[in-house]
Amino acid sequence: MILYTLAWIIFGCGMLGVYFTKYRGLPIEVYKPKAAWTHALIYFAFCNVVSAITGTLETLLNQPIITNEQLTNPMWVSFCLFCFIYIFFVYWILWARLTLTFDRKYYLGAEIVFGLLWGISTGQILLSFYHLWVMTSLPEWIIVICTFVCMGIWQYVIQDYFWDVRVSPEHDTPRSIMIKTILCHFPNIIICLLFLSIYNNYLIFVTTQTFALLASTIFQKFPAPWAKEKFHAPTIKPGLFGLPRGAGYQGE
């Protein structure tokens, strides 16, 4: 585990070096795939380091994926299937239909790699919030509420002020952002967090988030780092403390 953590730290520092030497002064209105991948890889490294140092990864790897008792429990099977079916409907169908691509090309191989990295990394850092609250030995309902609040704040800050500014090309409108938040993102976290709190399946939680973010990567046609065409940069507006945040495309 120490070597794993150290490897991610070294990798993250290397990506930070690339950022400072090549992309630090890149204007927000200029979208370059290599810069976007660099920003994302720094984030992935951070998520994996947090998961390792909090003990989340160790628990995830050491606990059974599914117990025999769960496999024979109709409630567990039904709830687990519901999580994946809901994510399939709202991300692989609804999210896809609400997403702008500006005629970008598919880079399916790169999109799958990126989506898996994004999902596994994000799933782990969200899981880390739950893991840390569980260690407080508070009542379960308080743990769920506190975890949900932490997950919501984290996702809001990262998505609005980092991801939709420095990583993703433009893929939303103000309307699609509102619909996705109400029908996709919040229900996803609520449903999967409840499943996690009841059955404690760490790996299944990470898998659900990976399943969702893989769809997000593919259907926004996330560019490969070697892509050369011109890309529509994210639309931004001032947010908290005047910081730029993703606002969604509003037309010419």
Image (cartoon, rainbow, N blue to C red):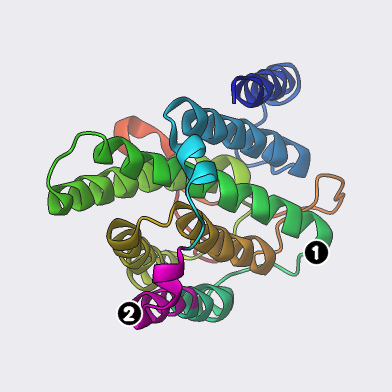
Q: Position of residue 40 (x, y in %)?
A: 63, 39
Residue type, label 1: Leu
Name the foreground residue: 95 vs 201.
201
Q: Position of residue 15 (x, y in %)?
A: 70, 25
Picture quarter with the C terminus:
bottom right
User: Which residue sits at x=34%, y=65%?
Assistant: 195
Q: Position of residue 251 (x, y in %)?
A: 54, 66
User: Which mark's residue is nearer the viewer, 1 or 2?
Assistant: 2
Q: Mark 1: few, some, or many residues within 10 Å (few <14, many ≥20)?
A: some
Q: Mark 2: few, some, or many residues within 10 Å (few <14, many ≥20)?
A: few
Query: Dot 2 corresponds to which residue?
Result: 75
Which dot marks residue 108?
Answer: 1
Q: Which residues are magenta?
A: 67-84
Residue 107: tell me if it is visible.
Answer: no
Name the foreground residue: 69 vs 55.
69
Does the magenta run of residues contain 65? no
Picture quarter with the N terminus:
top right
Residue type, label 2: Met
Q: CA distance from mark 1 to mark 2?
A: 36 Å
Sequence-earlier tag: 1 or 2: 2
